[in-house]
Image: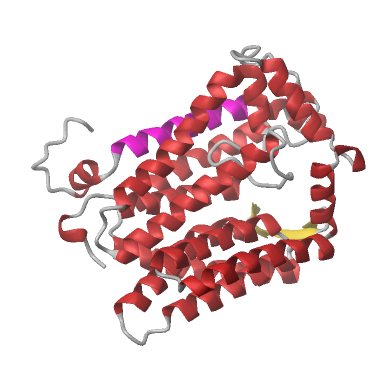
Amino acid sequence: MSALSRNDTSLLGRWWWTIDRWSLAALGLIIGFGALMILAASPPVAERIGLDQFYFVRRHFALLPVAIALLIGVSLMQPRTVRRLALIGLAGTIVLLVAVLLGGAEIKGARRWINLAGFSLQPSEFAKPFFAVIAGWLFAEWRRAEGFPGHIAAGALYLLIVSLLLMQPDLGQAVVLSAIFFGQFFLAGMPIAWVGGAILFGVLGLIGAYFTLDHVASRIDRFLDPASGDSYQVNRSMEAFMNGGLLGRGPGEGTVKAFIPDAHADFVFAVAGEELGLIACLLVLLLFAFVVLRGFARVLSEQNLFVMLAASGLLAQFGIQAIINMGSTLHMMPTKGMTLPFVSYGGSSLLALAVGMGMALALTRRRPGGGQP
């Protein structure tokens, strides 16, 4: 790759010299770390539920090349093509969200998955990146074209998708989507009088979820008072970090993965804490922060409002999802079934994140004159 000349005008040559190679390398390290953690954390989980020891490993590594190809392929796109991809993807995702409610599999009292050609798909994972791009475009058009009600259209789209998510119910994905929407609205120029209303809307929404969704109330109660319910996974997670110390017990030497049901998914960070230690976990945290902050630094000078808003939404989703996973694992917030990007096991999450970060890399490429609208 590095042998490509700056005068190379081929598609690959232009991509290599305009892509943010540092962010690409950081994402590659996160993906590699995720592969290592799947190898470490998933075999005991598979054995405990009666599956072949390497069941989750095989499934993850079968999808990993597809995810990498998606990330690279989407990052080759121009902003206009990214917008078209997001429009088609969001339309299909909304159809699938409705299909999930009508005939999706019910697991632990929630309908979030649908079976497509033998693959269990979670459409809500794809709703976040596609919505971030389309909402960014609608807000940009609202500012560019006088009289165009882009903010109203974005708001209506947000309410539609959030309603579908809450009907599953999936409060965590709804919270992430809300953060994307209100963050983009603020950057696009939300009237200052509406800012307080947005904060009030969020507070009232969480209060309403507490009193209407039993699983939300249970998780908040257990966070505030661990003795009020089953806090087994969180307690084992905290023990794992204490056992790991600064340098960890060594790869494969951890014991927590034999006891936590979601050690390969929601609590994979606890496995990393026990086996690799605090220093390694801090380095992983820095990688996530680097990707997000470097992405924001690149869009600060962006002249194209659509690119700035869409990229900001995608980066915010990536960062918020990582914060929620790490924070709940460390008992800094109520537990929520949110994957650690590119690290936790989950096919839908892996593919959706690959598309989302591929779009972020495409939008943050250097383009003379700001690129296509």
Q: Position of residue 318 (x, y in %)?
A: 50, 47
> If the image is split into quadrants, where does the N terminus sit?
top left
| Residue most extreme to the bottom | 147
Say if 154 sits above or below 133 in the image: below
Left or right of residue 148: residue 31? right
Q: Is residue 321 magenta?
A: no
Quarter of the image that includes the C terminus: bottom left
Label count reads 0
Seen as rendered, the residue at the extreme right is: 228
* Magenta span contains residue 23: yes
Identify the residue at image location x=60%, y=27%.
37
Question: Chief secondary structure of the magenta span?
Answer: helix
Q: What span is in magenta?
A: 21-39
In x, y percent, where is residue 55? 68, 33
Percent position (x, y) of residue 371? 21, 61
| Residue 266 visible from this viewpoint | no
- Quarter of the image for residue 81 reads bottom left
Q: Residue at x 38, y 56 (%)?
A: 311
In front here: 29 or 278? 278
Image check: 72 left or right of 33?
left
Which residue is located at x 72 percent, y 22 percent?
240
The residue sitting at 72% across, 36% down in the picture is 331
Nearer to me, 179 or 26:
179
Q: Does residue 1 appear anywhere in the picture? A: yes
The vertical placement of 82 against 21, above or below, is below
**Percent x, y for residue 184?**
45, 63
What is the image's colouring?
secondary structure
Vertical placement of residue 151 versus 346, above or below: below
